[in-house]
Amino acid sequence: MTDPRRQLPSVDRLLRSPELSPLLADTPRAVVVEAIREVLDQARSLDEVPLHDWAAEVQAAVELRMTPTLRPVLNATGVVLHTNLGRAPLATAAIEAMRQVAGGYSTLEFDLDRGIRGSRQTHCRSLLTELTGADDALVVNNAAGALTLVINEAAEHRDVVISRGELIEIGGSFRIPDILAKSGARMLEIGTTNRTHLDDYRAALDTGAAAVLTVHRSNFEQSGFVATPKPAALAELASQYGVPYVHDVGSGLLVDLGAWGLWGEPRVQQALANGATAVVFSGDKLLGGPQAGCLVGGSDLIGRCRGNPLARALRADKFTLAGLAATLALYRDPDQALSDIPVLRMLTLSAEDLKALAATLVAACPSSLEPRPVPGHSAVGGGAFPDAPLATTLVELTPGQLGAKELLRRLRVGETPVVARVADDKVLLDPRTLAAESLELVGSALARAVA
Ligand SMILES: *Cc1c(COP(=O)(O)O)cnc(C)c1O
């Protein structure tokens, strides 16, 4: 008997076949060759070689290789700061600022006035100090980096005091004990999970600790028999001992969202007013900018951080700095920030706005899915306002025979990927996180998915 594997076509024969040779017009030859090899290898690894549609298999393999893995998706989950989907969508002004520095040269580290080398830190520094009231500011790659940097500068080889109630995990391998270990400081845990008192901090400082750290419990809330000293009292205590008090507030909230029912997230300005020496926060959470880590506070500690080699290792690039500066500039007029920064706009949509968006979405969905508006909830996400009751109007779809899981899958792998939610064999779309212009796109993606 002949080995069926001998019957495989050669790479060359497939490459010259009338079905596949046209591919070479707009696909690099190396990509087509690799795809053919992959398809042949797969066939070879099977015990029996079934009938193959070589051209179709190679075409599919080529398409997979030519499609970028990082591509846009439509977020119909209603999770505003979805870390897996890239957190904050940017304001138009931020995108424009990034575009302007992308294709050419820029003043990244150049002082036009004097014609000499400048600092990349100037671009966000004055905006951050102006908006937060801090003396000084520094921007690095992300908040985890900013925390590592400031703790390294304040307490390398020494103790940093932290409550056992704040040894938290944010997700994506961000765990406070691990970050502190990598920053080169020793973690001095005090208090208990639910209660830590000012006297616990005082006792730790009496042993010669070098810094006090508090971390906002971003993604969970404690209630019941709990106690934590007021930040202002901690700041006062730290200053009595002449050590810095570092406060990681996490989300970078700069405006008061209480009027929209969003309470409990510390604002950066508040943390500084309470006397923190340095405040750490993300650029791409509630602030609504690009991925970045901001450090604001006293000029001595921030200045020392600027000179720390870790600041160089963690430095932000020109796109980040351009996008962050443009986002921050919008905060000079808080009303403009609420309307122009997508994260803030989505969080402050009114019930009527959401109803109207849901109605437009219902009209765009194929009627076979029996789309209908139902009351539901969105989530802030990104570890901010974990228990916020963010009421919304969802669009519920009934996939019937197809099944909700299969409809979700088809939506994900379609030409315009859509990520949605599922509950009780219904697919749920939340218009809160869909731009008004993308509602029609969701409708056509659904039409293709059920076709
Ligand atoms: C999200 C978060 C971080 C990490 O921020 P990144 O910008 O993702 O590095 C750190 N601390 C707190 C309290 C957070 O909520």
Image: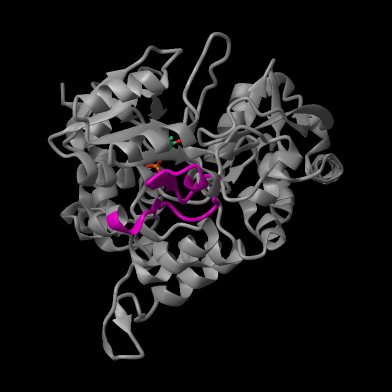
Q: Is residue 411 left or right of residue 19?
A: right
Q: Is residue 329 left or right of residue 119?
A: right
Q: Residue furthest front?
A: 240
| Percent coordinates x, y for residue 436 in the rendering | 74, 53
Q: Nearer the viewer, residue 398 or 112?
A: 112
| Percent coordinates x, y for residue 114 in the rendering | 30, 91
| Percent coordinates x, y for residue 428 in the rendering | 70, 29
Judging from the image, the colouring scheme is: one colour
Q: Residue at x 80, y 42 (%)?
A: 354
Residue 298 covered by magenta stretch: yes
In which quadrant is the C terminus drawn? top right
Q: Quadrant of ligand 1?
A: top left
**Is 184 situated above or below 283?**
above
Q: Residue at x 37, y 46 (%)?
A: 277
| Percent coordinates x, y for residue 44 in the rendering | 21, 31
**Is 172 situated above or below 267?**
above
Residue 365 covered by magenta stretch: no
In which quadrant is the N terminus drawn? top left
Q: Is residue 320 left or right of residue 384?
A: left
Q: Residue furthest left?
A: 157
Specify the segment rendered in magenta.
Answer: 272-300
Q: Nearer the viewer, residue 32 or 224?
A: 224
